[in-house]
Image (cartoon, rainbow, N blue to C red):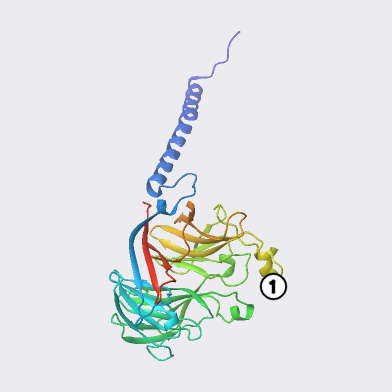
């Protein structure tokens, strides 16, 4: 019987097809391996993030002890600023600002209770610009920022057109201009939202509002009210979250939504289910004590990573504790379950600070520990 064999051209095409069938998967696998290799080289991501200890992720660089005295007591500390040579610290209880050298030596202090130039009512935040000027924020009831030269001499004041109380603030510097960002700390009703009080907003040094960040639907679509936890990196990005939420919205320097960091895959995150709480405030408070939940405590962009500080409560067999999760810039979880002792935490540039207070000391004693991340 005569066999029907394909002609030469058909045979050639069949051979090429077989070669492609064999070669393409190998090439695809090689390309995938290369891409994975590139990711590993640039970000050193663990494939399955495991719980980490604090010392595995953070490297202690310096410890400074600040002590008050009978003449210069330091009973309370707000958000402090760090320069190459000094710590500049607001003291809300004594209505003034203190300056210490990086070795803990006291330098000077200024201010007293009042509403005039150089006077303060519970100053709770200090920042420094590149010129060395010192910006001091006063919360309720003054709602203003005073700024001073590097020697502590009064320069000027501008008002804060927002509704408090306030949490974070940030200095933004671009093209020689300095702007001031404020974040409020309240659940906002409809009337105040419509008036523009309850927002994350940026002002110039004359007090004019230049920009407002963070529509609520972008921060946490399921919650009403103002998102009030924020962080800012050196490039001007803003990281904003609702304290009870499960996502972090990242805005570029122009205020546009850039991406969202999803916190839900993290084993440490159990958002508080607001829909499950009774509408009555008293019943709500009682019920929340019985639910297990995680609150976003602070956000710190540190170098190329995002450190997020959580407060966990009401977990069976686990008392209230503070844990840290570390994400990369794309929002991928690197490390989780990092516990640290309770204290004031703060990030600045590529540094992370934890401040603890010795309450047994008569005139105030604080230990400031400065860390860097043990990541490439």
Outermost residue toward the top?
A: 1
In this picture, is 88 found above or below 235? Answer: below
Residue in the image at 61% along x and 60% along y? 314
Q: Name the secondary structure under disc 1.
A: helix
The x and y percentages for residue 144 are 45, 84
Q: Quadrant of residue 279?
A: bottom right
Q: Residue at x 36, y 83 (%)?
A: 147
User: What residue is drawn where x is 42% and y is 69%?
Assistant: 358
Horizontal placement of 323 versus 358: left or right?
right
Could you tell me if residue 349 is visible in this image?
A: no
Q: Position of residue 125 (x, y in %)?
A: 42, 76
Query: Looking at the image, is 15 positioned above or below residue 85?
Result: above
On the image, the x and y values in percent for residue 298 come to: 49, 65
Which one is nearer the viewer's eye here, 10 or 87?
87
Residue 29 spot, x, y in % from top left: 46, 35
Between 342 and 26, the one lying in front of the other is: 342
* Residue denoted by label 1: 282
| In the displayed structure image, the side of residue 211 where residue 368 appears, left or right | left
Q: Which one is nearer the viewer's eye here, 228 or 66?
A: 66
328 in relation to 220, above or below: above
Q: Residues within 10 Å of mark 1 (few under 14, many from 20)?
A: few
Task: Using the rendered image of the protein, determine whether residue 285 is visible from the camera's viewpoint.
Answer: yes
């Amino acid at each position: 019987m005569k066999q029907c064999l394909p002609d030469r051209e058909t045979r050639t095409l069949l051979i090429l097809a077989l070669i492609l069938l064999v070669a393409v998967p190998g090439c695809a696998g090689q390309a995938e391996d290369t891409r994975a290799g590139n990711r590993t080289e640039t970000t050193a991501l663990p494939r399955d993030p495991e719980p980490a200890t604090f010392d595995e992720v953070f490297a202690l660089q310096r410890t400074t002890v600040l002590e008050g005295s009978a003449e210069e007591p330091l009973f309370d500390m707000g958000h402090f600023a760090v320069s190459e040579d000094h710590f500049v610290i607001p003291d809300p209880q004594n209505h003034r600002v203190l300056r210490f050298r990086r070795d803990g030596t006291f330098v000077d202090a200024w201010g007293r209770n009042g509403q005039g130039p150089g006077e303060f009512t519970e100053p709770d935040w200090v920042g420094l610009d590149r010129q060395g000027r010192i910006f001091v924020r006063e919360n309720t009831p003054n709602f203003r920022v005073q700024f001073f030269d590097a020697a502590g001499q009064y320069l000027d004041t501008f008002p804060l057109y927002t509704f408090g109380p306030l949490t974070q603030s940030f200095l933004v510097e671009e093209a020689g201009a300095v702007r001031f960002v404020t974040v409020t700390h309240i659940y906002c009703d409809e009337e105040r939202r419509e008036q523009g009080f309850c927002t994350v907003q940026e002002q110039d040094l004359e007090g004019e509002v230049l920009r407002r960040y963070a529509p609520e639907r972008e921060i946490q679509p399921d919650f009403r009210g103002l998102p009030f936890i924020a962080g800012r990196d050196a490039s001007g990005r803003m990281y904003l979250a609702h304290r009870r939420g499960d996502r972090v919205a990242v805005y570029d320097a122009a205020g546009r939504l850039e991406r969202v960091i999803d916190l839900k895959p993290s084993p440490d995150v159990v958002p508080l289910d607001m829909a499950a709480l009774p509408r009555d405030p008293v019943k709500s408070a009682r019920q929340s004590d019985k639910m297990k939940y995680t609150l976003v405590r602070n956000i710190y962009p540190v170098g190329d990573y995002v450190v997020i500080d959580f407060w966990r409560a009401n977990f069976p067999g686990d008392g209230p504790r503070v844990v840290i999760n570390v994400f990369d810039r794309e929002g991928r979880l690197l490390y989780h379950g990092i516990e640290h002792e309770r204290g004031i935490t703060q990030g600045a540039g590529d540094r992370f600070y934890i401040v603890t207070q010795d309450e047994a000391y008569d005139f105030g004693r604080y230990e400031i520990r400065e860390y860097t991340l043990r990541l490439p």
